[in-house]
Each structure stands twice: as C-alpha cells, then as structure tokens.
Image (cartoon, rainbow, N blue to C red):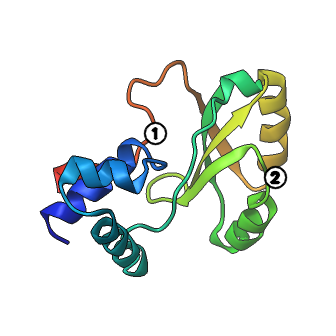
C-alpha cells in the first residue's frame, strides 16, 4: 500500500459513497486508475466492505450500554449463538480480565434494557455501563495515522 492508496482510503473513509471521479480529481489520477486501485485493495482484503451509519436516536434507541458478563468458558458458544441475531447487540467481544464478554447494545428505554439484562444474567454476573454522551464517535482505523 502506497501513499496514493492511503489517499484513496482516506477519501472513502470520509464518504464511502464518494464517486470515483471525485476521488480521481482529488488525487490527480484517472478514474480507471482509481477503480483498479480500489479493486486491488478490496481483493487484498484491506477494504473489506462499505457501510452506512444510522441515527439510532431518531429510530427511538435512546439508551446505549456496555455490558460485561462473567461466565464459565463452557457457556460461551451457547451465549454467542443466542445473542448473534439479537438486534439490540451491536458488538460482542471476548476479553481478558474479570469478565469474559463485553457487549455494546442499544435499547429504546431502560425498561427494555432491564428485560435484556434479566435474559443475559442466566449466563453469569453482569455489570452495566450506560453511555451518557460520546465524545469520539464510532470510527475505523484512521488511515492517515499509519
């Protein structure tokens, strides 16, 4: 990956829907050359997909929580399978430390969160941290930092 590839990625990070002709004008390469480079970055797995961002609050999800779960290792697979398709769960990671799992989940209300916690507590002890405000929005690796 060279400096031009990094500029292409930076442009797509700013706007994943940026037209190739705009990237081309910004970088100073032809549109076909930009297309070839993007295809190569995709083939190599450096660009693994494109996504959109929803405004959760406008969709009624006003409560974001990080939930840690202490559980015995034999329950992890069952736990992952149960919550894999749960629309409230945005992320779930196995971690080191006092807990074994940490989830990021969203809810319409604290009552909905409470019901979710009742369900998840069948796997072990939980600790819940409700987000009051986010000062750095979710983002991916910043390519200009590499």
Who is closer to the viewer here, 33 or 118?
33
Above/below status of 58 relative to 11: above
Mark toward the start of the polypeptide (2 vs 1) = 2
Above/below status of 14 relative to 131: below
Give percent across and percent down for residue 138.
46, 39
Q: How many angstroms separate mark 2 from mark 1 (CA)?
A: 30 Å
Which labelled disc corresponds to residue 124?
none
10 Å crowding of disc 2: few (<14), some (14-19), many (20+): few
What residue is at 23 percent from the left and 47 percent from the top? 26
| Mark 2 element type | loop
10 Å crowding of disc 1: few (<14), some (14-19), many (20+): few
Give percent across and percent down for residue 42.
42, 74
Quadrant housing the N terminus: bottom left
Who is closer to the viewer here, 126 or 88?
88
Who is closer to the viewer here, 59 or 103?
59
Q: Is residue 34 left or right of residue 130?
A: left
Give percent across and percent down for residue 23.
31, 52
Quadrant housing the C terminus: bottom left
Q: How many marks?
A: 2
Give percent across and percent down for residue 49.
51, 63
Is residue 141 in view? Answer: no
Residue at far top of view:
132
Residue beneath disc 1: 138
Residue beneath disc 2: 122
């Amino acid at each position: 990956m060279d400096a031009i590839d990094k500029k292409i990625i930076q442009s797509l990070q700013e706007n994943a829907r940026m037209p190739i002709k705009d990237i081309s004008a910004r970088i100073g390469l032809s549109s076909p050359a930009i297309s070839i480079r993007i295809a190569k970055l995709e083939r190599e797995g450096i660009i693994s997909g494109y996504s959109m961002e929803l405004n959760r609050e406008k969709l009624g999800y006003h409560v974001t929580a990080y939930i840690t779960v202490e559980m015995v290792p034999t329950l992890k697979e069952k736990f992952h399978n149960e919550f894999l398709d749960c629309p409230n769960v945005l992320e779930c990671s196995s971690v080191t430390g006092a807990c074994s799992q940490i989830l990021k989940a969203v809810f319409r209300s604290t009552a909905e969160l409470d019901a979710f916690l009742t369900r998840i507590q069948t796997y072990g002890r939980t600790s819940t941290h409700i987000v009051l405000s986010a000062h750095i929005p979710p983002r991916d690796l910043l390519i200009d930092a590499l």
